[in-house]
Image (spheres, rainbow, N blue to C red):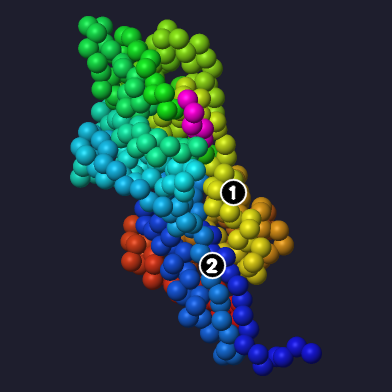
Amino acid sequence: MQNLSAPKSVRTLIAPDKFKGSLTASEVAEALAAGLRSAVGSTGRAGAVHCELLPLADGGDGSVDAAVASGFSRRSCTVAGPTGQPVPASIAFDGVTAVVEVANSCGLGLLPDGKLEPLDACSRGFGEAVLFALSLKPARIVLALGGSASTDGGMGMLTALGYTFRDAAGRPLSGSGRALARIHAIDRSPLSGLAGTELIVASDVHTPLLGSQGAAAVFGPQKGASAEDIAALDDGLKHLVTTMTEAGFADAASLAGQRGAGSAGGIGFACLLLGAKQVSGADYFLDLLDFNARKDSCDVIITGEGSIDEQTLAGKLPAAVARRSGQRPIIAVAGRSLLPRERWSEMPLIRVYTLAEYTDEDSSKDPELSARLLRRIGQDIGASLL
């Protein structure tokens, strides 16, 4: 016979993505867990919510932090920031796999005083972080491409990895969107260490390199590019493809047309030139962070991201989490939701909680407010479970 007076115990797996501009995935998970652990059931009966935290990433910014939170070691280095200034960066490493990230090496968040540099920002720092990862002799490197400040087609990254781009006078060029049009010749001297290392681009960005749906047109505006800048950058990227073909990359044009080549201002294209394999970012990181094994010991799964909307249903992290969760109840938490209640079943979700329901203030740029609201939401979720 069931003992109805015994305290109820519920095991939760808290597996969110970041709330971009506000909280990292780890901070989201920790705030929710704090609220859940302090919850009292609606009847006042004693109980406990046990929380396992699994901060997630989809191959974009936050990927290194998510890997570290799951047990990887953080390794620090100094690289050239998006405008050349030295910046501290970090990678994640578990002895076999290294995770290297654009956002923490040459991303938008590293621009001095936040001043956007659409023509002059460079991806060299990402290449230097890859170099640092190679020094650890990993079997594979996961290249996380979100949050770039540049649209240089990976020119800066390739420069760090042993390629030399020269102008018509034979002088070396530094990588930048502005420099793309000046490339006259390319010397191919890639590092020997790359040959024995598997390169993985884990991304769900499907943008090609060129054209109206390409890197400059789609992502240029958020990096500060005007209409004139976008046209110049797209022309420069076309010139990069042409000179790469002349330098011996016979498949440069076909690689430029692949989905994902335009990710991170064209760094995706450079990664493909190096032989990187493209995989789904959400699914790859769920495998890397051992989601399937971790979910098996829980009763309820809590996931989320900054905005729940149509793109979420198209395959972003919360949808991938839901797809893998089997029959377990799934609760989503978001800054806002544009998904009407009648569509929750498409993931499927039993409930969506949003910060917007708990405040009239804009929490999207206020980490302290966001964390406080997430703790309240955690308490409410916990009360509903006990």
Q: Is residue 312 visible?
A: no
How far apart are the alpha carbons under marks 2 and 1? 17 Å
Residue at horizontal 51%, vertical 60%? 54
Rendered view: 315 above or below 356? above
Q: Which residue is mark 2?
A: 52
Q: Which residues are magenta?
A: 195-200
Q: Nearer the viewer, residue 143 or 134?
A: 134
Snapshot quadrant of residue 332: bottom right
Rendered view: 25 above or below 213? below
Rendered view: 253 above or below 264? above
Q: Which residue is mark 1?
A: 287
Answer whether labels 2 and 1 touch (C-beta < 8 Å): no
How crowded pointer 1 is (Cα within 10 Å; few <14, some 14-19, many 20+) is rated as: few
Residue 94 at x, y percent in the picture: 47, 49
Residue at horizontal 60%, vertical 61%? 294
Which kind of residue does numbered mark 2 sit on? Glu
| Among numbered discs 2 and 1, the one appearing first in the sequence | 2
Which image quarter is the N terminus in? bottom right
Q: Secondary structure at mark 2?
A: strand
Which kind of residue does numbered mark 1 sit on? Asp
